[in-house]
Image (tube, rainbow, N blue to C red):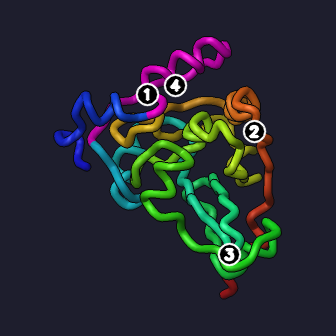
Amino acid sequence: MQMNDVTSSDIEDMPTSPENLLNILKSLNIPYELHHHEAVFTVAESQKIDADIQGTPCRNLFLRDRKKKNFLVVLQNATEIDMKRLPALIDSAGLSFGSPARLWQYLGVRPGSVCPFAIVNDTDNQVQILLDKSMMETDIVNFHPLLNTMTVSLKPSDLIKFIESTGHKAHIVDLSEAKPEC
């Protein structure tokens, strides 16, 4: 879906709209900066946008394991991981990327818009959220607010505050152990 393809009905179909998310952040007294931009779907596409936004650019991996357990791994773009080494760190086996249908079912977002804020749509607590330790040690982190035509910048501590407000536990994981071997 390109920016020009986003319609009001697309946003209306979302379990939580970006506007509703921003209202939740306000109700939690979480300060943030909102940036509008063209739709981006990959880290490579977002590089030119990231250059104009203060803070740590981040990415998100929606994964499932053989037992159909769901994980949302949130990490800074600079963190390298070997998907074969990741399962040992998160007590899992046989990780693969969740399908677009599964992503919509559990997090209520489309590919390209995956973000930690989507955890608000996991009302049955079926997704474990894992936060990159090195990302959490930065001053400001940047994520899409449920739609890839915007970016929200906020403090890592406020991200945890938001996650916990949804009834989820924010698991901080040192992903350096999953770094690819040279």
Q: Which residue is mark 2?
A: 168
Residue 21 — which label?
Answer: 4
Q: Rate crowding at label 4 as few (under 14), some (14 to 19) or many (20 or more) other CA atoms within 10 Å.
A: some
- Label 4–label 1 contact, CB within 8 A: yes
- How many marks the image carries: the answer is 4
Circle nearer the viewer, 3 or 1 = 3
Circle nearer the viewer, 3 or 4 = 3
Q: Amino acid at mark 3?
A: Arg
Q: Amino acid at mark 2?
A: His
Q: Is residue 72 left or right of residue 98?
A: right
What residue lies at 38% left-to-right and 61% top-to-bottom?
Answer: 44
Relative to 180, say whether 102 is above or below: above
Quadrant assignment, res 138: top right
Q: Position of residue 90 (x, y in %)?
A: 79, 65
- Label 1–label 2 contact, CB within 8 A: no
What residue lies at 53% left-to-right and 39% top-to-bottom?
Answer: 142
Q: Amino acid at mark 4?
A: Leu
* Element on which disc 1 rests: helix
Q: Is residue 31 left or right of residue 144?
A: right
- Label 3–label 1 contact, CB within 8 A: no
Span of residues in magenta? 15-38
Q: Is residue 42 left or right of residue 157?
A: left
- In primary-sequence order, the first of circles 3 and 1 is 1
Relative to 166, say whether 64 is above or below: below
Q: Rate crowding at label 3 as few (under 14), some (14 to 19) or many (20 or more) other CA atoms within 10 Å.
A: few
* Element on which disc 4 rests: helix
Give the Cα separation between the discs numbered 2 and 4: 16 Å
Q: Amino acid at mark 1?
A: Pro
Give the Cα separation between the discs numbered 1 and 2: 20 Å
Residue at the bottom extreme? 182
Q: Which residue is mark 1?
A: 18
Q: Which residue is mark 3?
A: 66
